[in-house]
Amino acid sequence: MADNSADDLPADRGEANADRPIFEALLTPYRSLGPKGFAITMGLFGAVCFGAGMVFVAQGAWPVFGFLGLDVLLLFFAFKLSYQAGKAREEISVSRTDLSIRKISPRGRIRESHHVPSWTKFRVSRMEEIGITRMDVASRGRVTEIGAFLNLDDRESFAKAFNEALNQAKKS
């Protein structure tokens, strides 16, 4: 029978265990309207604007038709901007030796920050009637905000899970 005591393990195996993630999360903005819903919304809005525009054309107020068309274009571009912003994401990983926060902008720009879990404080700002308004981690004079684009329910569940993982990393 083999004895698997810590003395028999290679030195690098202990380091590998320290770097193994305790917690990993991929945070993405919530978008309630998918591609099918977008097509239906734009179709209905376009039909209503077209119908209303035709009523105005029949009464001789033809410039209104153009402005209603402009409304459809503005709504279309507003949705496109919203979907573009929805491509942002944050990858968060906690191990015993590293807290990694990787922020990827909608255009693909990457900002990465690392904190030592034992020196890191997880701060949550709350408003009684709203809930969590801001979450960040701070260590050694550096502050990194996380989950700014999450909805209130997701902020609550993330904050709970992240805080537990960070506390576990500090105890290890």
Image (cartoon, rainbow, N blue to C red):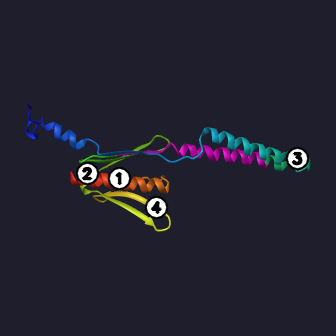
| Dot 3: element | helix
Q: Position of residue 73 (x, y in %)?
A: 70, 44
Q: Residue furthest bottom?
A: 128
Residue bounds of the magenta highlight: 67-92
Q: What amino acid does circle 1 point to?
A: Phe
In primary-sequence order, the first of circles 2 and 1 is 1
Q: Position of residue 21 (x, y in %)?
A: 29, 43
Q: Position of residue 77 (x, y in %)?
A: 64, 45
Residue 96 falls left or right of residue 102: left
Residue 82 sits inside the magenta stretch:
yes
Residue 146 falls left or right of residue 12: right
Which residue has dot 2 on it?
Answer: 169
Measure how far apart labels 1 and 4 are at the Cα level: 16 Å
Residue 133 numbered tag: 4
Look at 63% across and 38% down and name the residue there: 36
Residue 116 seen anywhere in this rendered image of the structure: no
Dot 1 crowding, Cα within 10 Å, few <14, some 14–19, many 20+: some
Measure how far apart labels 2 and 4 are at the Cα level: 25 Å
In primary-sequence order, the first of circles 3 and 1 is 3
Which residue has dot 3 on it?
Answer: 57
Measure how far apart labels 2 and 1 are at the Cα level: 10 Å
In primary-sequence order, the first of circles 3 and 4 is 3
| Dot 2: element | helix
Name the mark nearer the viewer: 2 or 4: 2
Name the mark nearer the viewer: 3 or 2: 2
Measure how far apart labels 3 and 1 are at the Cα level: 58 Å
Which residue has dot 1 on it?
Answer: 162
